[in-house]
Image (tube, rainbow, N blue to C red):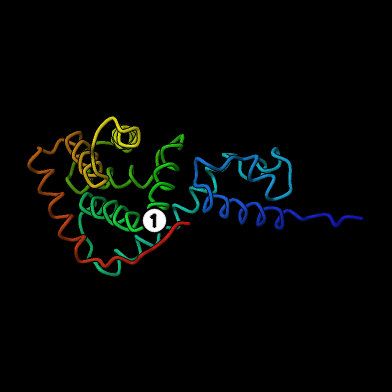
Amino acid sequence: MAKKRDKNEIYNKLLSETKNLFKQNGYDGTSMRDIAAAAGVNVSLTYYYFPDGKYTIAKMMCDDFSRKCAKTMHDYLDDQDPLLYSLVFYRYILRELLDSKNDLDFYIETWMDADYISPPLFLFTYNAFQDMNRTEDYQFSEKLGIKSNGIWTALNKAKISGTIEISYEEIRDETDTARMLMMGLSYQEAREYIDLAEKQLAQIPVMHYTIL
């Protein structure tokens, strides 16, 4: 008689096999059927453990990577205003990702598949308003986050399709500039913030963190 697998065993097996498939085939190249077959379960069961499908696991992996970056930033930089912190944070993430094309592609494909935007971006924007003694509420910050993420997604899609020639660093700059303009800063103020963020980024070593 076959041994009945417990929930933890199935969960860990799904997690392990999904990570292996991501490493072999990337995010877009991995399907829920692939995951189910590798784990030896039916497809419907995979959604029981991961309701949002493969995105659930991919986001966990990307979030873990981002936390490592945040910790390193904390180790090397003093406290600073929320807007500047967000600019350095996303540039540091990008710099680490550029160290591995597979990780970079995986990260971009994961976030382009997201049905919602990562809350930290909303919080960064809201805290920046508070630091400026502005009265915009959290919902307004969410709207700005969604708009700026839309710009990031559109530019990445255009780059991937070959519609435009643009570097990932330029995409980051364009996205952040748009967010700051929507926050009410002038173009020159936005550029000064980005220049300062680049200077602070130079103080943080490349740690070669990986996702896959």
The residue most toward the left is: 188
Name which residue lies at 67% across and 49% down. 38
Name which residue lies at 27% across and 45% down. 168
Residue 91 locus on image (x, y percent) = 26, 53
Q: Quadrant of the N terminus?
A: bottom right
Tell me if residue 140 can be seen: no
The residue most toward the bottom is: 75
Tell me if residue 84 can be seen: yes
Instruction: Specify whether 210 is left or right of 137.
Output: right
The residue most toward the top is: 163
Towards the viewer: 197 or 74: 197
Residue 200 locus on image (x, y percent) = 18, 61
The residue most toward the front is: 162
Instruction: Specify whether 143 is left or right of 130.
Output: right
Residue under label 1: 66
Towards the viewer: 80 or 111: 111
Determine crowd level at label 1: few under 14, some 14-19, many 20+ residues with C-alpha closer than 10 A. some
Residue 188 locus on image (x, y percent) = 7, 41
Residue 135 locus on image (x, y percent) = 22, 38
Q: How many numbered circles does the render carry?
A: 1
The image quarter containing residue 66 is bottom left
- Give the vertical position of 17 relative to 173 (above or below): below
Q: Please tell me whether mark 1 sits on a helix, a strand or a loop.
A: helix
Amino acid bearing label 1: Ser
